[in-house]
Amino acid sequence: MSDLAIPALPVPTQPLEGSDQRFPVRRIYCIGRNYGKHVKEMGGDPKEQPPVFFMKPGDAAVADGGVIPYPPGTSNLHHEVELVVALKTGGKNVAPDKALDLVFGYAVGIDLTRRDLQNHAKDKGQPWDSGKGFDASAPLGPIRPAEKCGGFDGRITLSVNGETKQDGVLSDMIWGVPEIISAVSRLWTLQPGDLIFTGTPDGVGPLKPGDVVSGEIDGFGAIRFTVA
Ligand code: MN
């Protein structure tokens, strides 16, 4: 007899680019308000409002190439294309100049958002979980090992049905990748398998059933999926 009262739970995993191995996912940390123009399009002031952190459950990560369900409880599902960091080692109070030592690789991810629920939560001072942390809310392209990735100056784009909606550059991040890793590690103990979404450029907008979504970041790969 097992000492578990119900069957053991599966660990969510994501594909690696150019490999049959998979990357086990623990937690998904996300940063909001990390590109100045996106802060402004959401009605904020990047100087007044520093970036904020929120989380998605690890099993919200789903591999690309497939069909993503249109989630319940919303009539305003939004796309946010983001560079995603995948960690191979953990740490706490990590200095920015040591932060990239923790990185296994990177992927292109979409921070799917039930914008109506998020805006309601913002207005009421309530948590963002229902707007951000729902099932399949973190579609992810294949994880590319860090040594095969480009620099943090590439173009980051998203198109819906072939029409470009988001078009930015990674160098417009308010907090760079090392600073983000360091900041998260001062609030939580990072562990292998953790993912960090690093924020989205401006141009976020709604998705509807049947839409084909493609995200791409120069030097870091791509993601593509269809909304069911
Ligand atoms: Mn986001």
Image: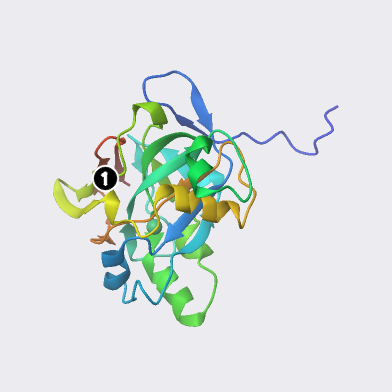
Position of 148 with respect to 51 (left or right) is left
The residue most toward the left is 163
Q: Nearer the viewer, residue 96 or 188?
A: 96
Q: Which residue is mark 1?
A: 153
Image quadrant holding the N terminus, namely: top right
Furthest residue toward front: 97
Q: Is residue 3 visible?
A: yes
Compared to residue 153, the image places residue 142 above or below, namely above
Residue depicted at x 28% and y 72%: 40
Rendered residue at 55%/48% (across/down):
95
Q: The residue tagged with tag 1: helix, strand or loop?
A: loop
Residue 34 at x, y = what percent?
37, 61
Q: Is residue 159 rendered to the left or right of residue 29?
A: left
159 and 193: which is toward the camera: 193
Q: Which quadrant would residue 106 be assigned to in this image?
A: top left
Horizontal and vertical percent position of residue 53: 50, 61
Rendered residue at 48%/74% (across/down): 121
Left or right, 183 with reference to 225 = right
The residue most toward the top is 20
- In the foreground, 174 or 70: 174
| Residue type at the position of mark 1 | Asp
**Residue located at (35% from left, 26% from top):** 148
